[in-house]
Image (cartoon, rainbow, N blue to C red):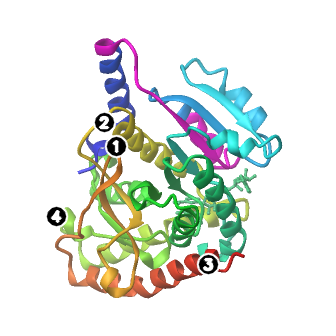
């Protein structure tokens, strides 16, 4: 179902780019801004994006170290121009102005024993500040939100855009790609397959029980025990990394890989008008609106306007139905928390 599971995305992008070169002699490209670019995710993500032929300007903003990161990346022999910005001299405004895509990995990561929601108090304010700049200076950009807790930070970005009269729910995405990347890898380990060919649908949100892999749709004949163990591993994959990093952070490299894939899909939809791009992502969604859940992650078709179509979950097992029921209260609380945070700002 996902383009990147059939053909590696970078090959797709490179092929598309080559086609554009030969037919028009000039390739359409876009400015992409990474906010939080000097961090554990930001640096490897920026490296992967420097490799993307669909980017003309790679704009790196952070509160520290972006001049060095930008200088380093700018020596790589790919065509995009890299610019680093700090908060002084209106750096954030310059970083986002004219950006077609803004990717946000800014904010603190978890330490062992913490939930993603424990990051809310610090990261909500960071995301609010960055979303405000985006709404003011790049109101038409696609926003890809990585900062946790994603279940709350996406509603925060949406509410900020509403405040500035710039809200378009089709353009605001919570990045849940890492859950799909992990699911494909973990499933392939059990089935002895190539993870590139495993297409696991993961829905819900991005934290613990809100991460719902639909393993019944795989035709894998897993036993109930295997299904439960795999589901748990996919739901709590982030904890494995947090524990292994022992207080020094959470997933950064696998997240950079996942975010680069997601950004490439946005670029292909936006810049070269590729059709049929389907990505799992956490967006404003009607799937569970009747239960008061305004945001939900599921497979989404993306075109040059953003969200084109939100796919329903399809046939799911009774076990998965229980998982969905268990996720909804958690999701509702996180969404309401994000919305309330912005409403209470004077
Ligand atoms: N959506 C997902 O699947 C995942 C999300 N994450 C989340 O991504 C976030 C970043 O994680 P890491 O890169 O590991 O953290 P990190 O601490 O290594 O990097 C964060 C960067 O954000 C910067 N920053 C802080 N305040 C800022 C501001 N106001 N403006 C711009 N930049 C600012 C910091 O200076 C730092 O360079 C965390 O919230 C983490 O939980 C991590 C992994 C997966
Ligand atoms: O676990 C964390 O805190 C980081 C994250 O979201 C993930 O790795 O899925």
Q: Residue at x 72, y 76 (%)?
A: 346
Q: Which mark is residue 219?
A: 4
Indicate whether 242 appears above or below 47: below
Which tag, 4 or 2, sits closer to the chain's start? Answer: 4
Find out whether the residues at labels 1 and 2 contact each other: C-beta distance under 8 Å: yes
Camera-side residue: 241 or 98?
98
Q: Which mark is residue 273?
A: 2
| Residue 28 x/y as whole percent | 41, 25
Find out whether the residues at labels 4 and 2 contact each other: C-beta distance under 8 Å: no
Label 4 element class: loop
Q: Which residues are magenta?
A: 22-48
Which tag, 4 or 3, sits closer to the chain's start? Answer: 4
Q: Residue at x 71, y 75 (%)?
A: 121
Q: Residue at x 70, y 67 (%)?
A: 125
Judge from the rendering whether residue 47 lies leftward or rightward of residue 9; answer left or right.
right
Residue, disc 1: 304
Ligand 2: give its quadrant: bottom right
Label 2 element class: loop
Judge from the rendering whether residue 287 lies leftward or rightward of residue 74; answer left or right.
left
Q: Was residue 47 drawn as part of the magenta stretch in this picture?
A: yes
């Amino acid at each position: 179902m996902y383009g990147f599971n059939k053909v590696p995305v970078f090959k797709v992008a490179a092929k598309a780019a080559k086609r554009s070169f030969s037919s028009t002699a000039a390739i359409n490209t876009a400015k992409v801004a990474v906010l939080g670019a000097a961090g554990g995710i930001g640096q490897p993500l920026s490296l992967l994006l420097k490799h993307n032929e669909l980017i003309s300007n790679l704009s790196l903003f952070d509160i520290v170290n972006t001049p060095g990161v930008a200088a380093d990346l700018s020596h790589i022999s790919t065509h995009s121009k890299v610019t680093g910005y700090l908060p002084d001299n209106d750096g954030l405004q310059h970083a986002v102005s004219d950006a077609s895509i803004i990717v946000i990995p800014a904010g603190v990561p978890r330490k062992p024993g913490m939930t993603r929601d424990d990051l809310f108090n610090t990261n909500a304010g960071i995301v609010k500040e960055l979303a405000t700049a985006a709404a003011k200076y790049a109101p038409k950009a696609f926003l890809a939100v990585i900062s946790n807790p994603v279940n709350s930070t996406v509603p925060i970005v949406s509410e900020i855009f509403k405040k500035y009269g710039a809200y378009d729910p089709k353009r605001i995405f919570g990045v849940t790609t890492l859950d799909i990347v992990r699911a494909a890898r973990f499933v392939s380990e059990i089935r002895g397959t190539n993870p590139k060919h495993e297409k696991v649908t993961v829905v819900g949100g991005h934290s613990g029980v809100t991460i719902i892999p639909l393993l019944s749709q795989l035709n894998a004949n897993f036993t109930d025990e295997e299904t439960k163990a795999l589901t748990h591993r996919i739901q709590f994959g982030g904890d494995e990394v947090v524990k292994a990093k022992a207080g020094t952070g959470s997933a950064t490299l696998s997240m950079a890989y996942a975010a680069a894939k997601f950004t490439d899909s946005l670029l292909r939809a936006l810049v070269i008008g590729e059709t049929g791009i389907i990505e799992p992502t956490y967006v404003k969604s009607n799937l569970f609106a009747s239960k008061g859940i305004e945001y939900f992650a599921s497979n989404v078709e993306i075109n040059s306007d953003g969200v084109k179509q939100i796919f329903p979950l399809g046939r799911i097992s009774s076990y998965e139905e229980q998982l969905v029921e268990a996720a909804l209260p958690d999701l509702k609380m996180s969404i309401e928390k994000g919305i309330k945070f912005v409403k209470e700002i004077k």
